[in-house]
Image (cartoon, helix red, strand yellow):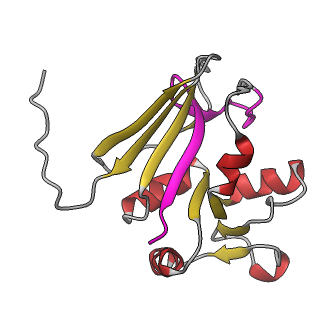
Amino acid sequence: MRRIRYQVACSLDGYIADTNGKTGWIVDEPEIDFGALFDQFDTLLMGRLTYEGLVKDSDGFWGKTALVFSHTLRQEDHPQVTIVSDGAQAKLNELRSLPGKDIWLFGGGKLFQSLLAIGCVDTVEPAIIPILLGGGTPFLPVPAVRQRLTLTSQRVFPSGIVWLEYTVRQAGEFSPDPPDA
C-alpha cells in the first residue's frame, strides 16, 4: 500500500514559512539529492495556499499528479489538478490502494492537521533547518490531535539540517503516556 508522507522543511522553532509566507530561509544542502527525493513520489497533496503559491512561482508539478484540498476552488477553473472539497478520507484511502509510488503531503500545515486527524498520514518527515524564525506558518497548527510517533530514521547534514523520519502509530498501538514531570 502506498504511504502518505508529510515531508517538509521547517525552522527549529516549528515554522514551515515565515510571516510573509516565504521559504527563502531554507538553506541549500548539496548532499541532499533532490532528484532522488522527488522520484520517490508520483502524487502531491496540497492545500489551496500552497497550490496558489506553486502556480504563481513555478511552472508545474514536476510531472506528478496533484490533488488540491479546498472548499473554495472549483474543479472547472483548475483542470491541471484534482480539487478535493469533500470525502477526503475515502479519496485518500482509494488513492493509497492504487499501484504507484508514495504520496507526498507537500503542504501545508493546515492540511497536515486535517489529514492527521482522520488517520491519513503514514510518516512525518521534517527537515529541521538551523534557523529560528520567531513566527510564521506553523508546522502543525493548533488545535491538533495528539499523535504518537516512532522514530525510524535520522540524518545530519553539513549545513546543520537535521532530517527526521517518524512513522505515525496506528490507533490501538499501546504506549502509555510518560509520567508528568
Q: Is residue 45 visible?
A: no
Above or below, 113 relative to 178: below
Which span of residues is magenta-colored?
A: 1-24
Q: Could you tell me residue 93's position as x and y percent?
A: 45, 77
Q: Is residue 180 above or below residue 159?
A: below
At 49% across and 42% down in the image, what residue appears? Answer: 125
For the N terminus, the image quarter is: bottom left
Q: Nearer the viewer, residue 158 or 141?
A: 158
Question: Is 18 part of what is drawn in magenta?
Answer: yes
Q: Nearer the viewer, residue 17 or 129?
A: 129
Residue 50 place in picture, x, y as percent: 71, 52
Residue 170 seen in this snapshot: yes
> Residue 33: where, in percent of width, then height?
70, 38
Q: Is residue 165 above or below residue 90?
A: above
Q: Is residue 24 left or right of residue 19?
A: right
The x and y percentages for residue 107 are 62, 51
Q: Quadrant of residue 45?
A: bottom right
Q: Residue at x 70, y 26 (%)?
A: 29
- Quarter holding the C terminus is top left
Compared across the picture, whether 80 is left or right of 26 comes to right
Q: Is residue 94 left or right of residue 130?
A: left
Question: Up-down: is 139 above or below 120?
Answer: above
Residue 6 in the magenta stretch? The answer is yes
Q: Residue at x 57, y 63 (%)?
A: 103
